[in-house]
Each structure stands twice: as C-alpha cells, then as structure tokens.
Amino acid sequence: MLLQACGTQYIVGMQQKPTTPGLRCRVLAPASATWEPRTLFIVQSKGDAASPSRLWLPLLDQGWAVVIPELSALEDAERARRELRKHWEDCGRKRGIDLQGAVVVGVREGAPRAMELAREAGAPWLCVLPVFPRGFDPGPFAAVPAHSLGAFLLGELDPARERALRLHAQLVAAGARVVARTLKGVGGEVPLDV
C-alpha cells in the first residue's frame, strides 16, 4: 500500500500480530529508500495508532522509518509491556527492521511504556507531552545503561508538565542523562510542527 505525503510516496506495511488477534503494527518507510533508514518506534494510544499521524510523515523525508504498534490498552501496564516487547521482537525478526539505532518515542499516555521498553532494549527515548500516572516510579530509569539517552518534550501550558519536570529532576539527580525542553504556548495537544 502506498501513501502520498509531503509530495513523496511511502510504503505503508501492516503486520497482523499473531499472538494477540486484532493488533497490528503500522510501518511507514520511504518507497524508494536506497539506504537502511533509522527507526522511530512510536508508543501512543490505540486510537492514535490506527492511522499514520501527520506528525510523523515529514520524518520519512529525513531518512526515518516509523513503526507504530497498536496496543490493546495502555492503562494495563503489564499487558502493554508484553504487547510492546512482542511488537519490538516481531519488527526485528519477522519484518527485518534494524532496531540497533532505533529511538523509542512515547506520546502522552504512551510515555511510561516507551521509557520501559527503551530501558529493556537499551535504546534512547523521547517523551512527547508525557502523561505519567500518579504513583509512577521513576526509580528503575535511573539504572539505565550509561550509553542510553532520554529527552522530554513538554508543553508550556500542559497540565501534565509539572509531574514530568519532577520526574526529569529525579532522573537527573540519580545520574541519568536526560534533557527536558519546553514548547512555548503548547498545551496538551501535540502540534504538527514539532
């Protein structure tokens, strides 16, 4: 299946997840790529994963492949962890996607699960307008490998910003290599020009 965006055609692949019926993994990659693209592994809500976000499409022109796994429920932390691990493994083994230099991106409620997956995979992570539930334990993230990196992209007007900044401060105090940047005038909706 081809998708037209930014004046370029892209291959859109769908992978039916064999162990969890009804869950798919959307893979977007430049149709005429003559190189091995770097990979963004996007963790976001099921509704957001159903269609390719216009936010990610411009990244295809910059040499990124985008993987958007569908999850049954982000609220069920253990189930989401299992599904993400399975998607990650399937992308590497069954789809042949190079995850060696992948960046795990968590959007809104997907941020905690993205951080967990990145920690397990030893991958860098980015949390875009993250929402962390009450009681979220940042402790395990302070023990990430020294080579891994993390970043928070926060909205100045986002009510979830303060909790993310507290988490950022805890991680930095524990020695983690994490940066935080604030987007001026941005609330809880992800802008298309990030």
Image (cartoon, rainbow, N blue to C red):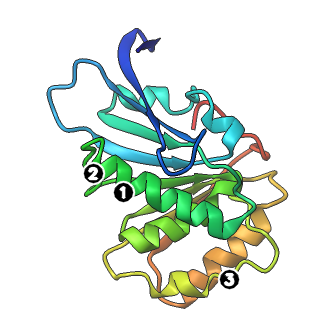
Task: Give me the residue at 64% from left, 70% from top.
Answer: 78
Local crowd size for mark 2, using a 10 Å CA cut-off: few (<14), some (14–19), many (≥20): few
Amino acid type at circle 3 is: Asp
Amino acid type at circle 1 is: Glu
Expressed as whole percent of the image width and height from the top left, the position of residue 77 reads 68, 68
Determine whether the residue tagged by mark 2 lies in a helix, strand or loop. Answer: helix
Determine whether the residue tagged by mark 1 lies in a helix, strand or loop. Answer: helix
Q: Which quadrant of the rendered structure holds the C terminus?
A: top right
Q: Which residue lies furthest to the bottom in this view?
A: 174
Residue tagged 2 = 93
Q: Which quadrant of the rendered structure holds the N terminus?
A: top left
Q: Quadrant of residue 114?
A: bottom right
Expressed as whole percent of the image width and height from the top left, the position of residue 177 reads 44, 76
Amino acid type at circle 2 is: Arg
Residue tagged 1 = 89
Q: Do the residues labelled 1 and 2 touch (CB within 8 Å)?
A: yes
Nearest to viewer (mark 2 / mark 3):
2
Nearest to viewer (mark 1 / mark 3):
1
The residues tagged by marks 1 and 3 sit, at their Cα atoms, a distance apart of 25 Å
Vertical arrangement, residue 14 with respect to residue 137, above or below: above
Determine whether the residue tagged by mark 3 lies in a helix, strand or loop. Answer: loop
Expressed as whole percent of the image width and height from the top left, the position of residue 148 reads 36, 72
Vertical arrangement, residue 172 with respect to residue 102, above or below: below
Residue tagged 3 = 137
The residues tagged by marks 1 and 2 sit, at their Cα atoms, a distance apart of 6 Å
